[in-house]
Image (cartoon, rainbow, N blue to C red):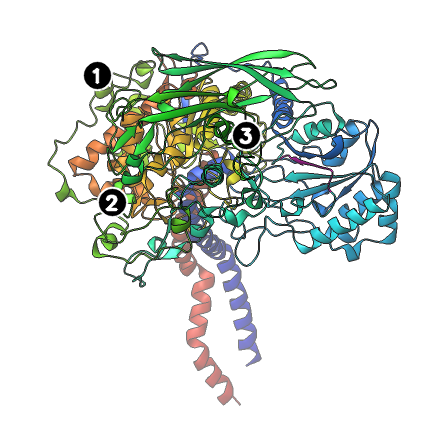
């Protein structure tokens, strides 16, 4: 028995040893390779699907130039080095802030502060400034100076005890959370309660009591509007009020001499705390979001090294809720909505019931009607609502206007105004912004046909050079008469000039403009029983008369295209799919039409059908011939450089593309455009840029870009300096050139419809004209460096609530005069040639699927022939076929929704022809961009993929091979093992073991 056990043990040991030698390594290799292969193939599939994002995050590209031509440089940078470019950008950002910051209060010349003043900085925000907003426009401000550093650079002494209290003491735990990505909710005020201020901190103020500098910061961003229901994020919170109360007490006690408030917000703060100046504030300076170096300009303003010359681009109110738009700022769910009837993201809407009366166009018009005693104006008190009007901004000196002269240049169809501006102060040199406003007659025709007229509308502006005390400058400002025309949606269906008296006036702000015009009409404060709150200057007003209604002169666009209603389906009063109606706010009945609550709309069968994700139906189109594909015409994109869009040669080039290449170029463009081998077209790298070029949203440390983080766009606009805007554009263009970016997602051109828009920092103003003019110069500067600009978000992305799918209902006059006007000037005047579409629906139809908008207005009326891209394709209603048929040419698609959809239409000639035309627009933009730098006559394109994907593919393939090798060798070695003596002997013993055991038991 023991002998058998010993024998078994020896044979088993030899068996296992031989198995470990012949089989186990290959078994382990196979199992390990199988596990790794199972893990890596799906990972590779995911990364391949999101290869655009991968390349933007870790680096890489999708093409290489072969035979690159070093002499084929079509657009060159202006700087000798990155360091020189960045230094100039920092200087320019500071200049922009210096000319954009608006001085709102300066009681008893509290500013500038005395040289070497000792100051205390109050609020948690004083140590944590808002440099820019959050989301895709987020900027890197990690290298920016803070307020203390900026103040110390100009010679102020800063209270270190108080500063440390906020940075590392008890107040530090109340710091505002860092932003960056897309928001899901509004930020909240993060101020420290006064109860955590220690005696040491409060006692430290006396030594630094020349001024208490209070920073009131608010931050907005992509994804969420600011809180206005159940709280008011733009009003002082209780902790801020308590802080201000205690500062006022310190001032009364003589601990501090002055209280200076800095409003660090791109959203108009509700300044009711200044109405009766209950906190004894001495000076208030609006600084917006300051960008990478703007805070240094703020410090210089406080020190008197810079004389502020900014003018507000939004109306600042004592009561932000007084704006009529606030009554329709909350999305409303359609009556009759049930889950599954329509997509959930199509279930809500807003009605822009205020019409054209946005911002100052409401407040100033209501004021004038009240002053003149117009019927139904109501008992309106302007000063209860408005703290500082649109265009307002003080200086450390005073200016006087005189010698207004106006001529009409018939050849240019422009009024040419000249006005003398004199610095009448005796101490400070400064700049002055002169604003030109127009008033059109509000006639019986307008009342009958629903045409609304604001009391004043900005139509021109200019800014002086630095004027020393006593010095003068004559400014010449041109006003396009076309900008004076009004859109008549319900009557002529085009732009009109009414019969009647027109007024032009030069003014310091919108309210001053109204008073000037009232003066020209003979009104005074005395004759209106005090309803007129200040005397105007009739001498600064020009009047002319149009003898008859003109419905023809401006019924064609600047390029000669007839202008007619294109957006009727977004006006519930003209929309044929519903019998519902809405009463828009009208100055003919302020009290009777002022919005009180949102109008409830009920879904109809037509609306339900139009709110489905895909609207394209081949039955609605006549049959078309399939275009040529894959031909060999011997052309390259290089051959198209400089050719007009309609040059016949383009058709020969487009014949060479394959269907798959068109799908790739159109549908796979998340921050890239893909190369096209058949025509040797390089791809391009594209990025965000409302405050300057930024890759913060999807980049890593490895792929961040050298670029200037400018101020928020409202600060840019507040400079009223088009030369500065040109320089901003030029620097952004240079930043893009240096970074290899050929297409910029920006600037942002939506409107500050209310103060609570989450992305107001990305947009210029509440005024469409100012937005458009300032943007036109910025866009021209960017495009001068060969960077294709796609302004966002076209259009009506004026709120972030339900932004993916929200339906907006409005009349066409408001659409054209307010919301589209901001995009129009950059296209028609600034050489802009593309837009990024909004997620918003116009009524029921997605912006990118609205042919009247994308083709009728943008392509035809305005002449935009470049690349029109969607916002990130995160939803199925932003779809390929509807966009292509309407005028979209390319999709910023992180998800493969479009590249999966378009192949389903490969045999549909209507869609394939639309794809071909979309490629025409895209390639036209690329051919005339810096993306062609290095492409010469003999240059070809090699298709590649990001290195990380290549490496991963190699690894996956290697493990797949190892898996196969392991399986084969496992099988072969297993066979060899079964044939070896050790296996045979052990198995033979196992078979005879029962017999041996019985024999052993029976043996005596």
Secondary structure beneath disc 2? loop
State which tag comes first along the sequence, 1 or 3: 3
The label nearer to you, 2 versus 3, is: 3
Q: What residue is disc 2 on?
A: 574
Q: Position of residue 587 (x, y in %)?
A: 39, 41
Q: What residue is disc 1 on?
A: 648
* Residue 695 higher or lower than 90, as above or below: below
The Cα–Cα distance between marks 2 and 1, rounded to whole angstroms, is 40 Å
Can residue 726 be seen?
yes
Name the foreground residue: 960 vs 402. 402
Secondary structure beneath disc 3? helix
Q: What residue is disc 3 on?
A: 512
* Residue 838 higher or lower than 225, as above or below: above
* Residue 365 higher or lower than 995, as above or below: above
**Residue at x 52% of width, y 72% of height:** 8
Crowd rating for badge 3 (residues with CA inside 10 Å; few <14, some 14–19, many 20+): many
Crowd rating for badge 1 (residues with CA inside 10 Å; few <14, some 14–19, many 20+): few
Secondary structure beneath disc 1? loop
**Residue at x 14% of width, y 42% of height:** 620
The label nearer to you, 1 versus 3, is: 3
Q: Position of residue 265 (x, y in %)?
A: 60, 40
The Cα–Cα distance between marks 2 and 3, rounded to whole angstroms, is 37 Å
Can residue 67 be seen?
no
Q: Position of residue 729 (x, y in %)?
A: 51, 22
The label nearer to you, 2 versus 1, is: 2
């Amino acid at each position: 028995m023991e002998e058998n056990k010993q024998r078994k043990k020896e044979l088993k040991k030899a068996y296992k040893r031989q198995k470990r030698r012949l089989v186990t390594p290959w078994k382990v290799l196979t199992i390990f390779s199988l596990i790794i292969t199972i893990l890596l193939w799906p990972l590779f599939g995911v990364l391949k699907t999101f290869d655009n994002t991968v390349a933007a995050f870790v680096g890489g590209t999708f093409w290489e130039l072969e035979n690159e031509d070093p002499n084929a440089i079509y657009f060159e940078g202006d700087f000798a080095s990155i360091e020189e470019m960045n230094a100039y950008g920092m200087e320019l950002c500071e200049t922009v802030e210096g000319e954009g910051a608006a001085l709102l209060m300066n009681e008893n010349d509290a500013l500038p502060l005395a040289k070497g003043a000792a100051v205390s900085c109050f609020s948690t925000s004083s140590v944590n400034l808002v440099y820019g907003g959050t989301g895709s426009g987020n900027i890197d401000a990690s290298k920016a100076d803070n307020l203390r550093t900026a103040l110390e650079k100009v010679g102020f002494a800063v209270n270190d005890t108080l500063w440390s209290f906020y940075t590392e003491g008890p107040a530090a735990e109340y710091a505002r959370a860092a932003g960056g990505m897309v928001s899901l909710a509004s930020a909240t005020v993060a101020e420290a309660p006064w109860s955590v201020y220690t005696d040491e901190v409060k006692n430290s103020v006396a030594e630094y009591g020349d001024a208490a500098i209070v920073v009131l910061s608010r931050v907005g961003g992509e994804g969420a509007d600011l809180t206005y229901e159940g709280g008011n994020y733009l009003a002082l919170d209780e902790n801020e009020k308590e802080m201000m109360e205690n500062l006022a007490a310190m001032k009364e006690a003589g601990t501090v001499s002055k209280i200076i408030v800095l409003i660090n917000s791109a959203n108009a703060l509700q300044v009711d705390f200044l109405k009766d100046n209950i906190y004894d504030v001495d000076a208030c300076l609006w600084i917006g979001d300051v960008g990478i170096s703007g805070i240094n300009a703020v410090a210089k303003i406080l020190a008197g090294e810079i004389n502020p010359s900014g003018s507000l681009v939004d109306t600042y109110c004592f009561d932000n809720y007084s704006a009529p738009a606030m009554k329709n700022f909350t999305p409303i769910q359609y009556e009759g909505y049930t889950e599954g009837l329509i997509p959930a993201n199509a279930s809500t809407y807003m009605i822009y019931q205020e019409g054209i009366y946005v911002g100052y166009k409401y407040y100033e018009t209501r004021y004038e009607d009240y002053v003149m005693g117009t019927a139904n104006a109501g008992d309106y008190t302007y000063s209860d609502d408005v703290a500082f009007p649109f265009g307002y901004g003080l200086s450390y000196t005073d200016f006087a206007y005189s010698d207004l002269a106006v001529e009409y240049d018939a050849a240019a169809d422009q009024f040419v105004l000249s006005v003398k501006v004199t610095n009448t102060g005796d101490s400070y040199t400064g700049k002055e912004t002169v604003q030109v406003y127009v008033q059109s007659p509000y006639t019986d025709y307008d009342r009958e046909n629903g045409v609304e007229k604001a009391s004043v509308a900005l139509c021109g502006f200019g800014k002086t050079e630095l004027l020393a005390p006593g010095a003068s400058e004559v400014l010449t400002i041109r006003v396009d008469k076309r900008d004076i025309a009004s859109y008549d949606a319900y009557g002529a269906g085009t732009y009109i000039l009414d019969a009647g008296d027109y007024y032009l006036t030069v003014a310091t702000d919108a309210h001053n403009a109204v008073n000037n015009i009232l003066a020209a009409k003979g009104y005074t404060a005395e004759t209106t029983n005090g309803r007129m709150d200040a005397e105007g200057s009739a001498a600064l007003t020009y009047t002319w008369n149009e003898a008859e209604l003109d419905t023809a002169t401006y019924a064609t666009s600047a390029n000669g295209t007839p202008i007619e209603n294109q957006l009727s389906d977004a006006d519930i009063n003209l929309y044929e799919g519903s019998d519902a109606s809405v009463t828009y706010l009208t100055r003919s009945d302020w009290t009777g039409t002022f919005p009180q609550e949102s109008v409830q709309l009920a879904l109809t069968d037509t609306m339900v059908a139009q709110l489905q994700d895909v609207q394209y139906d081949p039955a609605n189109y006549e049959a078309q011939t399939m275009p040529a594909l894959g031909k060999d015409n011997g052309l390259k994109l290089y051959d198209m450089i400089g050719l007009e869009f309609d040059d016949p040669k383009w058709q020969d080039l487009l014949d060479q593309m394959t269907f798959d290449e068109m799908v790739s170029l159109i549908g796979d463009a998340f921050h890239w455009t893909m190369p096209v081998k058949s025509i040797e077209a390089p791809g391009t790298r594209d990025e965000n840029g409302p405050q300057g070029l930024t890759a913060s949203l999807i980049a890593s440390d490895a792929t961040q870009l050298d670029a200037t983080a400018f101020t928020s766009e409202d600060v840019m606009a507040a400079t009223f300096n088009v030369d500065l805007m040109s320089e901003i554009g030029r620097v952004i263009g240079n930043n893009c050139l240096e970074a290899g970016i050929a297409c910029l997602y920006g600037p942002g051109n939506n409107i500050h419809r209310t103060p609570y828009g989450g992305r107001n920092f990305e947009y210029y103003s509440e005024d469409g004209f100012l937005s458009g003019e300032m943007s036109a110069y910025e866009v021209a500067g960017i495009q001068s460096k060969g960077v294709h600009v796609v302004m966002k978000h076209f259009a009506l992305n004026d709120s972030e609530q339900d932004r993916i799918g929200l339906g907006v209902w409005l009349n066409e006059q408001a659409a054209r005069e307010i919301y589209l006007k901001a995009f129009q000037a950059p296209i028609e005047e600034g050489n802009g040639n593309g837009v990024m579409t909004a997620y918003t629906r116009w009524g029921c139809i997605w912006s990118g699927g609205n042919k009247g908008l994308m083709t009728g207005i943008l392509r035809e009326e305005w002449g935009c022939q470049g690349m029109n891209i969607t916002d990130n394709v995160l939803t199925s209603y932003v779809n390929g076929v509807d966009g292509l048929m309407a005028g979209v040419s390319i999709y910023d698609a992180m998800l493969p929704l479009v590249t999966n959809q378009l192949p389903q239409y490969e045999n549909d000639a209507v869609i394939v022809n639309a794809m071909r035309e979309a490629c025409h627009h895209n390639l036209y933009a690329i051919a005339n961009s810096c993306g062609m730098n290095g492409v010469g006559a003999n240059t070809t394109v090699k298709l590649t993929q990001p290195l990380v994907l290549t490496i991963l593919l190699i690894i996956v393939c290697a493990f797949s091979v190892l898996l196969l090798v392991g399986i084969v060798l496992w099988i072969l070695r297993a066979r060899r093992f079964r044939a070896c003596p050790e296996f045979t002997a052990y198995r033979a013993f196992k078979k005879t073991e029962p017999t041996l055991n019985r024999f052993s038991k029976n043996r005596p």
